[in-house]
């Protein structure tokens, strides 16, 4: 019998209650979420107080932890509003609260003194003395800056006593762990207040002052010039090395992402951790998981500051672009016994004769050639008997359709087609 190896916690993002459910179903050990105030994804949906309670109840009932993001910088005039908000939150049973602002920490100690504190990557912790500083302030975990070197990570873990968390997947910033002023300067939207306009991803041209309407491309590639455009972090291939250091938590970035992205990245990293536990994390398994990971939209991957010896990869942006190999086309919302197939809420168009690639929790993806699409009639007088359902050749966004013959799938199935 193979002895199982202890692996880090898998921490997954969720921007709303629906995506939290997908994160839980696909194998997250913990989910991090934000409210309507003081978090670094203020442009997203986020959770109302009622939804926070529902989300925690759902996660806790399935043995999954929930961490609450309160990681925005806080201005002095907002301290009164912050305390009022904390008073509304103090009866909600979060497993930890993620913070970066000293004032927020002081306010938490006053209003919710027993709250477990996790320190955000926003504070740029890069050494073991910094971790000890946060420990002395009462923190139980620190999320290290993405700029941390692997050798430094090992030394930090050896010389500290609290939990260490690292990002293993998701977007990178052009500035130290999100401390960027570009968006605020160019668009009036402060990245440190959760309003980032992602100005670093924009296309740029050269403008000569005497010719205000004449734009000159700064030649870089056929698609234009993205002088700040960063790659996406992906440490999948290095997970075993990271796990062996004793790191406590692997974190996935993406609180603005869809259920497709959250489900797939959670599925991949959960499967990787299971392989590590069973001592089966081979090159073949890594290649397989990397192929699956490419089924959601992403920029070209990098192993970032953690493992690169030469940072030129992070500076050379001429080949950086979005990789879109598959299109997310729908989610399961029910099952039709009459047609022996799933009822699908369509997200993007797909057609008869295309091949569905279907992701479900904890099992290998399956493929299914579409021979028939049935449009579900929404007429309330239809009595759900299917008499007025009709066959169509193309399913469009917001349609509810049935794929006959596909059988009974997991209620959290995700449907994709190859582009």
Image (tube, rainbow, N blue to C red):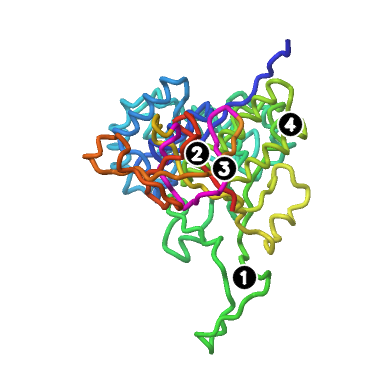
Residue in the image at 45% along x and 38% along y = 14
* Magenta stretch in the rendered image: 340-363
Establish if 138 lies above or below 130: above
**Residue 277 position by quadrant:** top right
Residue 397 in the figure: left or right of residue 262: left
Residue depth check, mark 4 versus mark 3: number of the one nearer the observer: 3
Find disc 4 in the rendering and name its residue.
241
Nearest the eye: 183 or 345? 345
User: 312 or 395, which lies in front?
Assistant: 395
Residue 127 picture location, percent across and down: 65, 37
Q: Which of marks 1 and 2 is nearer the N terminus?
A: 1
Q: Mark 2 points at which residue?
A: 414
Tag in front: 4 or 1:
1
252 falls in the magenta region: no
Q: What element carries label 1?
A: loop
Residue 155 in view of the camera: no
Instruction: Please tell me whether mark 3 sits on a helix, a strand or a loop.
Output: strand
Q: Of discs 1 and 2, which sits in the foreground?
A: 2
Mark 2 or mark 4: which is in front? 2
Q: Name the residue under label 3.
A: 369
């Amino acid at each position: 019998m193979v002895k199982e190896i202890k692996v880090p916690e898998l921490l997954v993002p969720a921007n709303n209650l629906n995506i939290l459910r997908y994160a839980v179903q696909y194998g997250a050990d913990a989910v991090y979420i934000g409210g309507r105030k003081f978090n670094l994804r203020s442009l997203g949906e986020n959770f109302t107080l009622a939804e926070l309670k529902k989300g925690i109840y759902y996660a806790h009932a399935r043995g999954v932890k929930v961490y609450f993001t309160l990681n925005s910088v806080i201005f002095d005039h907002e301290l009164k509003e912050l305390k009022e908000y904390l008073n509304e939150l103090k009866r909600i049973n979060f497993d930890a609260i993620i913070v970066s602002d000293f004032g927020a920490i002081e306010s938490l100690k006053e209003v919710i003194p027993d709250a477990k504190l996790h320190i955000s990557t926003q504070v740029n912790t890069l050494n073991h003395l910094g971790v000890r500083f946060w420990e002395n302030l009462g923190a139980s975990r620190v999320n290290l800056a993405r700029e941390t070197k692997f050798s430094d990570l090992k030394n930090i873990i050896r010389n500290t006593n609290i939990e260490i968390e690292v990002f293993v997947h998701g977007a990178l910033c052009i500035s130290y762990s999100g401390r960027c002023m570009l968006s605020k300067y160019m668009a009036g939207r402060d990245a440190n207040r959760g309003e980032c306009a992602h100005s670093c991803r924009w296309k740029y041209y050269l403008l000569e002052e005497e010719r205000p309407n004449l734009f000159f491309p700064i030649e870089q590639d056929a698609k234009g010039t993205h002088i700040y455009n960063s790659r996406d972090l992906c440490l999948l291939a290095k997970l075993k090395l990271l796990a062996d250091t004793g790191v406590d938590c692997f974190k996935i970035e993406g609180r603005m992402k869809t259920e497709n992205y959250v489900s797939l990245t959670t599925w991949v990293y959960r499967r990787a951790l299971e392989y590590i536990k069973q001592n089966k994390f081979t090159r073949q398994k890594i290649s397989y998981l990397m192929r699956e990971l490419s089924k959601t939209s992403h920029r070209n991957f990098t192993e970032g500051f953690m493992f690169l010896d030469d940072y030129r990869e992070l500076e050379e942006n001429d080949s950086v672009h979005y990789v879109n190999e598959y299109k997310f086309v729908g989610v399961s919302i029910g099952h039709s016994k009459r047609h022996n197939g799933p009822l699908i809420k369509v997200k993007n168009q797909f057609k008869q004769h295309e091949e569905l690639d279907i992701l479900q929790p904890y099992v290998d993806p399956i493929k299914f050639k579409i021979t028939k699409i049935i449009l579900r009639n929404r007429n309330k007088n239809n009595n759900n008997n299917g008499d007025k359902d009709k066959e169509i050749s193309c399913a469009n966004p917001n349609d509810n359709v049935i794929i006959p013959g596909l059988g009974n799938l997991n209620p959290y199935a995700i449907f994709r087609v190859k582009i």
